[in-house]
Structures are given as C-alpha cells and as structure tokens.
Image (spheres, grey):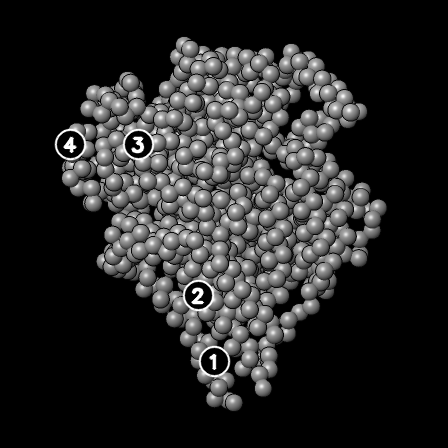
Amino acid sequence: MKRTFAAIAVAAAALTAAGAQAQNYPTRAITMIVPFAAGGPTDVIARIVGENMSKTLGQQIIIENVAGAGGTTGITRGAQAQADGYTIMMGHMGTHAAAPALYPKLRYDPAKDFSPIGMAAGTAILIAARKDYPAKDLKEFIARLKTEQDKANEAHAGVGSVSFTTCTMFNVMIGIKPTRVPYTGTGPVVNDMIGGKVDYVCDQIVNLVTQIQGGNIRAYAIATPERSSALPDVPTTKEAGLPDYQVSAWNAVFAPKSTPPAIVAKLNDALVKALDDPATKKRLLDLGAVLPQGNERTSAWLGDYVVQEVARWTPILKAGGVVAPE
Amino acid sequence: MIRIRAPQETAAGLFLIVLAVLVFWQTDDLAVGTLRALGPGMMPRLLASLCAICGIALVVYSLVKDGAQLERWSIRGPLFILGAAIVFGLAIRPLGLFVAGPAAVILGSMATRDSRFVESVVFGIGMTTFCWLLFKVLLSLPIPVAPWLLGY
Amino acid sequence: MEAFIGNLELGFTTALSLQNIALCFAGCLIGTLVGILPGVGPIATIAILLPLTFQVDPTGALIMLAGIYYGAQYGGSTTAILVNIPGEATSVVTTLDGHQMARQGRAGVALGVAALGSFFAGTVATLVIAALGVPLTKLALIFGPAEYFSLMIMGLAFAVVLARGSILKAGAVIFVGLLLSTVGTDLQTGDERLTLGLVDMMDGIDFAVLAMGLFGFAEILRNLDNPETRDVVQAKIGRLLPSKQDVKDCIMPVLRGTFLGGALGILPGNGAVLGPFASYTLEKKIAKDPRRFGKGAIEGVAGPESANNAGAQTAFIPLLTLGIPPNAVMALMVGAMTIHGIIPGPQVMTKTPELFWGMIASMWVGNLMLLIINLPLIGIWVKLLKVPYRLMFPAILLFCCIGIYSVNNNSSDVLMTAFFGFAGYAFYKFGFEPAPLLLGFVLGKLMEEKLRQALILSRGDFATFVTSPVSAGLLIVAVLVVVVAIIPTVRKGREEAFQE
C-alpha cells in the first residue's frame, strides 16, 4: 500500500516536473539519432535540418549516428529513450515503413511507439540502366525486361536498402523476377553500372544525378508527380507509362511515444521554420529533395502517413520474395 | 605410446577444431546454396572446414615433432583489464564518463601488483578530466558525461 | 602540358589563400590528434565537424576535411609504432616492425622514417592525381566483381608472407579472420549468420572492435605477463631522427611502396587497404635477410608507410573523377560535398575547377604541414614512452574504451572488444599472430561479396575468373607468392628429415 502511494507520488511529481519542463523546453542540448552512417542521404538531411532547428530552439541539436540492421538499431534505441524531448530521431522509409516486413523480430511498432513530429524531406527515386541498354524509353525497357527476364541483372545496395525496397516494388509491379545482384552500398553499384557489368537499378536521385548528367548512366523515369529541376529531361513515371510507381525515400522526425504535446508542438514548429528558411531550403532542394507542403507538415499527417506506408509496403515486400532474417 | 611433444601446437590445433565444430553447429540451419547462387552457409562452413584441417594437421605435428610449451595463463591481468572494460561498457550510458572513466582506470590498475591505490584514484580522476576536455570539449563527441547530474 | 601547369597554378592559388591555409592546418592538426587516439577515427571527427564547415565555402570545407583524413593516417602510424595498436586496417603492417623498432629504442627513427616516407609518397601521389587522375579512372572501371575477387585472393597470399612463424599457423589464422568476417546479416538473403542471436552482431564485427581487442587489450595483457620486455621500451631511448644510413636504406622501399600503394589506391573497391601489405610482402621477399622482418627492419616501416599514404591520396581519384567513394571516410566526404551543394561525379572537374584543383594542391600543402607538425612531435612521443607502465596501461585502456564507444556510440561494442581482448590473449598463448588474422578479416567481407556477385553474374560459371586477363593475372601472382613462401619451409623440412 505504502509502496503504491509512493509510486503515485513519484509519478505525480514527475508529471508536474514534465509540465514545467515542457514550458522551458529546451534547457539543454537535444540528441537526434540518425540510424545510418554519417554521410548518407538521411544523415545529410538531418544535419542540414538540425542545424537550422538548433537556431530556433536556442539549443544545439547533436547528431548521433547509430547505424545498423537497416537503421532499426538506432530507431530501437530512440523508441526506448526517455520521452522528454531531449532524444529525437530521424526516421526513414526503411525504418518506419519497410522494416516490419523485413525484420520479424523488430522491437518497435512504427505506428504505435512514437510521437510523430513532422516530415522533413523525401528524395525522389529514379529507374536507371547502364548507358548502352538497348531500350529508348521506359515502355521499351519494361518490355525488354519481360522478354529477357533470365538475362537481366538488377543491382541493389543490400537487403533492406532503399534501392532494394523500391526496386522490389518495381519488379513486383511489372511482374518480373530478374537476377538480383547484392552490393554493399550505392558506390559499388554505380561503379559496376558505369562499367556495364549490371543492367539496372532503382535508387535515390542524389546517388545517380551526376552520372546521368554526365551520360554514364541512363535514367528512364523519376517516381515523383513532377519532373526534377536537376534532371528536366527525365520523364515522370506517370508520363512514361507506369503511373502507379510513386515512391519517395522519405525522412521524418520522430520522438519517443508519449512525448508531451507541448514539446512535440515546439519541435514541429522548429522543423517547419527550418523548411521555410531560404538557405536551408536551397541546400535541401540542391540535393534533389522533395519538401512537404501544407498539411503534410503537421504531426498528425505524419502519424497517418506511417500507417499507410506500412500497409502499402508489407504486402509488396512479402510478394517480392524477401528472405527475412529470422 | 603417443606423447605430446609440442603442447602449444596441440592446444592451438584443438582450438581450431572446436571453433570449426561451433561454426558448423551455429550454421546448420543456413542453406549452402548452389554455384549460381551461393547460400549464406557456404562460406562459413567452407572456412570452418579449412580451419579444422589446419587444426588436425597441427595436432598431428605436435605428436611427431618437438615444439614450444604452452605458457602459463595468468588470471589477474585478464580479470582486471577486461573487467575494467566491461565495467566501462556497462556504466558509460547510464552513469556517464565521470563514473565509468575513473572506475575503468582504478579497476584496470589492479591488474598489476606495482600499482598503488591512492595513485590510481588520483590518476583516474585526472585522466577522466583530461579525456573530458579532449573528447567532449575539444572534439565534441556525443559521449554521456554525467546523465544523473547534468542530464547528458 | 600547358593545361596541366595552368591547372596546378589554379590549384595552388586556391590552396594558398590565407583562409584555406588556415583550414588545411586546422584539419591536419585535428586529424593527427584523432589518428593518434586509438579507436577515434576520422569518420566520427569529420561527421562532427561537418556543421562547423557550413559557414565556409565548399572548397575550404573540403580542404579541411581532407586534411583530417590524411592527418589521421599520419597519426595512426604513431600509435601503431609506440603502443602497437593499429587504428586502421592500413596501419596493421606498421605494428609489425615499427613497434619492434620502438622496443629497441628506435621509436624516433621509426616515426621519422614513417613521416618522411609518407611525405614523399604524398608528394608523388599528388602529382599523379593531377597528371593522370582522369585517364586512370578508365582503368579502374575495368575492375568488376571477378577482378576484385582475384585481387582479394592475391591479398590473402600476401598475408601468408606476413607471418613470422609457421606457414600452417599463418594459414589457420587467416581462415579464422575470414570466418569472423562472415559474421552478420547475409548480404543476399538477409539471414543472420553466426550472430549467436545477438542484435549487436547483425552488422558483423566492427574493425575497430576486433583491432582494439586483438592488439590494444591483448597487448596490455601480454605486457603484464612479461614485465621484462615492457621495460625495454623505457630503458633505451636512441636517436630521435633517422641517420644518413637509415635514410639510405629506405630510399628504394619508399619508392616501391609509393608505386604499389598509389596504384592500388586508384581502385574504387578500397584497394588502398592492400597497399601496405603488398609493400611489406615485396620488401620481405627481396630483402637479403628476410629473417630481420618482424624484428625491427626499417624497410618494413618505410615501404608500407609510403604505400599507406600514397594510397590514401590516390583514393581521392575515384571520388573526384567518378563520384564513387572507395571507403567509409570517402563516403563521408561525399556527404560533405552534397551538404555544400556539390554532388561528386565526373562534372566536378569541369563545373568547379577551383574546387577540384584546389583540393589536389592542398593535399601537397597538407602533407608538408604534417611533416612540420609531426617531426617536432616525435620528441614528445618518445618522452611519453618513459611514463611508468603501471600508469601507461590504464591510460591506454581508458583511451581504447572511449574510442571504441565513440565509433558507433554503442556500449556493447566495448563489451565485445573485451571478449576479443581475451581471444587475443588466448591466440598469443597458442602462438597465433594477430596481423594475418586482421588482414583476412578486412579482405574477407569484400571477397565473399565479390565472389557471389561474380558467380551470380556469370550464372555459376567459375571460368569468369580466368577469362578476364586482369583477373587471371592476379590469380597467377597469388599462386606464385604462396609457392615462393612455401618452398623454403618444405626444403627445410626435408633437410631436417635427412639429418635424422
């Protein structure tokens, strides 16, 4: 009895403290977990956005890279952190949409174990092939893949990577089972693509853009509603005849479950301000990033979006014949 | 009558054989695959087999050729050095550098009889302060300093 | 030729602006510092300093970050020589003879030769990048999965030569190293392999964890077991700088090392890792008395250190001309460039020539600065060796712990290092050498990846490794190296048999 009372007292004290804390928040540096190695697209976006958010919040945002297991190691740690707003994380299409299908032992639920803060930026996905692939547009490319399934070599950057998941969707959508060649990371994929050793890849625009501009790799389509300013000649999937292929490698900020709403609001406000800041915006757009507009910037929208994305990716990845780690 | 002539080689060989058996046991559920698509089990088992062959060869040699003795293993060194590292690993996140640092230095110092307790306490605090300045202040690595006191 | 001089002129005008000199110096200084600290690598540091470079223009930012990278290479050699801890795969070889030299009271000479050799190699490599960077890129593209696999096989053949003792035992530890590299999630199927069900093992074993365990912790344990050998280091402090004879002994090894390291560094598949090993193998093979190697042979420091630095520089070629990062640090440089709005690729050279040539020129400036920073420091390092061991080893222990933690900000890495520390101690008792094991580990991951890619692409046909001339050539070299290494032992064995 005494113990229960003590527990309640402690909880009450903690709540009051939390309330007071939320008002002055933040009083010290905030850690943002990036679940990938430093230097990758997600890390770059987190650093650009985080730098501007620090200015609004008046406290430094420290990036902590906790890479591993397709990003799930870092997000697991973030989900288990104290919900006081001092540990937040940069979630990703992989960790918050594809992971439940890829990792049966996943120790968090993307929809339930987080307080969504807001969408940061997405990067567009390209369908690209080696420069001498005998097909002049996406329609011909798909037709050829269908007739030469056993000859086609698709390269991806490892099970669970963006190029793996997005190309799984592409393959499932056009109904082919090509030979899939696994690499560790995008660099070696691009190398062998330029060298003509593999046939095609789906990947984020930032990883391929200069090779396409330089004519080393040919892009067939970009999976966004509108064309990219960096590659104005590349048609959208809608224009090229595969309108259902709409994917983006999105990155969004999350806090652990039951973070006080006042803190969530402050963080969302700082994030939105960062996206509106001209210098930050330019840096992101230079990367080929797609920024959220209007209500896509609210916390509530992100919460719904995660639910939709999990529902969308799970059947595709299962159909794609992924051998999931047990 | 078989006599072990090179105990160090025997031990090394037995170690390799045990390692190989462990690998086979741990990978028994992994597919070996085909030539066109090597399975996840192929490399580990191939390498384990090679380890086992080397191990058997070492054991056989150790029975026919004279060689080195197996040196005495000390307990004090591994216990305190590795213990200190384990304590550091367990303490760094919940308690921070200001606890884990001195603890590792003091515990580690006990690995040798030459050390003096008071000296290692002073040295531990000094080194931790130095590391705090170096890693946290100068290089600003995200290392917890004292979460129970400072909140980070 | 005129264009070449014009380009270099543009480069030096950019690199020698007051701001860029300051940034280059800052980068080199920070790089040296983190290189010396065991475990703390250039990756963590560059990541942390990235936001600080937002205020500077991209050229200045990249000059500073590149300075951290090659500064860390210089610093890493210092730790390898003084306390026998390789901070990176490329300084594993330096521990072999470098640390032995330190034990013989020749730490200053080893450090001096390392710095001078590195400077020379850096100078040559910079010129190579400037003159041949673009055509060499085409060469790099010849390397597909099959060629890389054969290259890795050749690297493993070097590892056999690396060993001091029995060939059988050397082969065995290489296999153990390869085995350790297979730990983690399978590349192709996503199956967990040998992870013992631990989440922290899913991405395999980190190089820093293994190296700190096998070298850092195990070295302390070994020294505690042998109080007499550890005091040798403190007893003798010889000359601080190499003598004329030392320099003379090193000229040829430095030249050969520079060539090997520079050539391998161009390969986008992290060929730079092989440079020091190849150089060591070569020096040991052509030496009049190969038995000196592993006991403080100066060529065993000079050659590999030059190869290391030449490779570190030429590794920029695939990054700058193709936009393909050959290793984790270069991947981070890609991130740094993209943050600054420059996406690395073939256009960097034409679109932003001042950045491209400025960076190349700054590499030479940086190497000169590193020489100036490092030579006076030798005196301080050598004095550090006089610290009594009872204080030295807890300090190394603490630095290692913090360093390992900072690699992934993961405390279980520290626990795993303790485990490998014990394994390293056991290996020492069994008479196994850790250096070939580390090489096997480094090459293993890439080797399996490339083997599987090559076989997938050839649809299971092993002929793919011999139909490509490059691949076939590399395999022949590998066989030759192993045969040459084994013949003396076989002959010796037979002679002994006859004597009985």
Q: Real-space Cα distance between discs 2 and 3?
A: 41 Å
Q: Which amino acid does label 2 sit on?
A: Leu
From the image, state whether disc 1 or disc 2 is nearer to you: 2
Both labels 4 and 3 in a single chain: yes
Give the residue number, with chain letter if any, for mark 1.
Answer: C492
Residue C441 in the image: x percent, y percent? 48, 54
- Label 1 packing within 10 angstroms: few (<14), some (14-19), many (20+): few
Q: Position of residue C448 (x, y in %)?
A: 38, 53
Q: Which amino acid does label 3 sit on?
A: Met
Q: Earlier in the sequence, mark 4 or mark 3?
A: 4
Residue plotted at (52% across, 62% down): B19
Furthest toward the right, the residue is B118
Q: The disc numbered 3 marks a residue on which chain?
A: A
Badge 2 marks a residue whose secondary structure is helix
Out of A278 and B18, give the one closest to the viewer. B18
Identify the residue at horizontal 80%, vertical 56% (top origin): B114
Residue beneath disc 3: A169
Which residue is the site of mark 4? Answer: A140
Chain name for mark 4: A
The residue carrying mark 2 is: B50
Q: Which of C98 and A14 is in front in this view?
A: A14
Q: Is residue C120 above or below residue A32?
A: below
Can you see residue A26?
A: yes
Q: In this view, does C453 lie above or below A94?
A: below
Q: Mark 1 lies on which chain?
A: C
Q: Residue A297 at what x, y percent from top left?
A: 44, 14
- Amino acid type, residue under disc 4 in the picture: Glu
Number of other residues with Cα within 10 Å of mark 4, as a class: few under 14, some 14 to 19, many 20 or more? few
Q: Can see residue C324?
A: no
| Mark 3 on the same chain as mark 1 | no
